[in-house]
Image (spheres, rainbow, N blue to C red):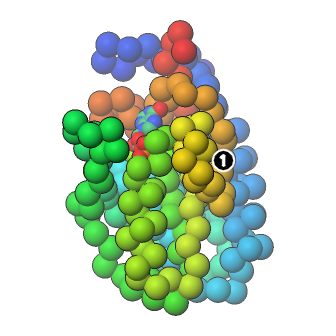
Amino acid sequence: MSPVKILDRSFIPFLNEERILNRIGEMADEMNSELAGDDTIFIAILNGSFMFAADLMKRIRFPSQITFIKVTSYAGTQSTGTVQSVLGLNQSIVNRNVVIVEDIIDSDLTIDFLLQDLRKQAPLSLRVCSLLLKPGALQVDLKPDFVGFEVENQFLVGYGLDYDGYGRNLRHIYVEEGQ
Ligand code: IMP
Ligand code: MG
């Protein structure tokens, strides 16, 4: 694994593909025992989670569906910011187990918005799964049910994560040099 340059920034290796896939295997195993036998729908959040969602789903051993939604967050002038749904949910989640699939949880704004929205639609259960977790999320008391790796407040790219839209295709995860 060598360093990569994306636009004006340099990134060095952080988590290699093998480590990522091993951990995803463990997360899938947890889900395979916890959710076995129930009707489950995975809701993956675009764009960042596309690679994680694909590798996770290959390892799920119970009948389930996957769908994708897209939300955007606007920081604006308010410190809280707002989140908007730009590609909504078409399937019904009434009386079904729901697992939200995220690439990384940072401030938790995105997840918080989604949880509020989905709770209104009467699912049987609602779980959150994130490949990566930054410390900010823990300050607002959001505890995802399944977490791949807890990381520091550092900027990461690769394996779905982007810098200004680039770098999502990288098979490993990289951290910005000097962080
Ligand atoms: P939040 O939890 O609402 O702050 O937003 C999480 C979203 O911010 C993720 O889905 C990513 O798209 C993006 N994000 C957060 N941290 C990083 C990072 O280190 N690299 C790339 N994208 C990030
Ligand atoms: Mg994202």
Q: Is residue 10 left or right of residue 133?
A: left
Q: Is residue 3 above or below residue 37?
A: above
Q: Residue furthest top?
A: 178
At label 1, counting other C-alpha atoms closer than 10 Å, the crowd grade (few under 14, some 14-19, many 20 or more) is: many
Q: Amino acid at mark 1?
A: Gly
Q: Which residue is painted at 55% across and 32% down in the image?
A: 173
Q: Considering depth in this image, is 96 or 1 the residue closer to the camera?
A: 96
Left/right placement of residue 78 relative to residue 103 reads left
Q: Residue at x 75, y 64 (%)?
A: 30
Residue receiving disc 1: 148
- Mark 1: secondary structure: strand
Q: Is residue 94 visible?
A: yes
Answer with left or right where residue 143 lies relative to residue 95: right
Q: Position of residue 144 (x, y in %)?
A: 61, 56
The total number of labels drawn is 1
Most extreme residue toward the bottom is: 95
Q: Nearer the viewer, residue 17 or 15?
A: 15
The answer to whether residue 143 is above or below residue 39 is above
Q: Is mark 1 within 8 Å of ligand 1?
A: no
Q: Quadrant of the C terminus?
A: top right
Residue in the picture at 57% in, 62% down: 128
- At a point 75% along the width and 55% down the height, the residue shown is 26
Q: Is residue 176 above or below residue 24?
A: above
Asked if one can make out residue 160 in the rendered structure from this viewpoint, the answer is: no
**Does 33 sit above or below residue 154?**
below
The image quarter containing residue 166 is top left
Horizontally, residue 17 falls left or right of residue 86, namely right
Residue 27 position within the rendered picture, expressed as x and y whole percent measured from the top left: 70, 57
Q: Quadrant of the N terminus?
A: top right
Residue 32 sits in quarter? bottom right
Q: Position of residue 65 (x, y in %)?
A: 49, 77
